[in-house]
Amino acid sequence: MKTRLKVLASGLLGATAVLAGAIGAWYHLWQRAGTPSSDSNVSIQLVSSTPVDASQQNQQQDQKQNPQQLQLQNQVYAAVQQMLQAPAPPSLDASGFVQSVYAKAGVQLPRTIAEQAQTGILIHRATNLAIGDLVFFDLDNTGAATFDGIYLGNNQFAALTTHGLKVIPLDDPYWSGKFLYGRRVL
């Protein structure tokens, strides 16, 4: 996934700084000597330059991410990473996994896929997904959402499948043919 970002750096740097990488909401600021910067006078703002494709709403909404939204995205991402390290409880299914991850980030979601599929702002295209967006799939070829997961950025999502908790590429031949839409709840 190509992430287009505007990077604004301000403050007294004291040395030339280089933004070494930006993936989703994650960034690293390096000084020319190659050591991480801890300069409290440096502020970095990452702003997505891709508008959200929201159905029947303002199609060209400004997508500046506020610090609270970035913090929630980071919490969701961290919760997914934590759950990937431990086996999922046997009582969880796909929507239970999604609900559990968001609960760890302090966000309440409905329990079922059908309810989750009606929550948040509709994102029609996978290319407009952001970290933390819910992704929905039609595994039964009925036209309705029957499976969901959490978008992790870099064209990947996490989901609790019948084979366990997995990180799956959205362009996987099986999953790309089943993708319906995303929902932005953060």
Image (cartoon, grey):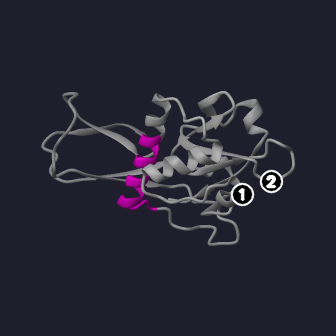
The answer to which image quadrant residue 93 occupies is top right
Identify which amino acid the numbered label 2 is placed on: Ala
Task: Using residue 45 as the reference point, say whether residue 156 is left or right of it.
Answer: right
Using the image, tell me which numbered label, if any, was put on residue 114.
Answer: 1
The answer to which image quadrant residue 167 occupies is top right
Task: Using residue 160 as the reference point, say whether residue 179 is left or right of it.
Answer: right
Task: Using residue 56 as the reference point, say whether residue 142 is left or right of it.
Answer: right
For label 1, count other residues whose C-alpha is less than 10 Å away and answer few (under 14), some (14-19) or many (20+).
some
| Residue to which mark 2 is pinned | 144
Q: Position of residue 11 (x, y in %)?
A: 19, 54
Q: Position of residue 69 (x, y in %)?
A: 42, 58
Q: Position of residue 168 (x, y in %)?
A: 62, 32
Give SS at disc 1: helix
Q: Could you tell me how far apart the alpha carbons at marks 1 and 2 are, in whole angstroms?
A: 8 Å
Farthest-out residue, front? 91
Rendered residue at 50%/55% (across/down)? 49
Q: Split into 4 quadrants, where in the image is the N terminus? A: top right
Mark 1 or 2: in front is 1
Marks counted in the figure total 2
State the residue in front, 174 or 61: 174
State the residue in front, 92 or 37: 92
Give SS at disc 2: loop
Vertical relation: 41 (above or below) 19: below
Rendered residue at 37%/60% (across/down)? 68
Q: Is residue 65 magenta?
A: yes
What's the magenta bit mostly, secondary-structure-wise? helix
Farthest-out residue, bottom? 57
Mark before the other along the chain sequence, 1 or 2? 1
Question: What range is drawn magenta here?
Answer: 64-79
Tags 1 and 2 in contact by the CB under 8 Å rule?
yes
Rendered residue at 50%/62% (across/down)? 63
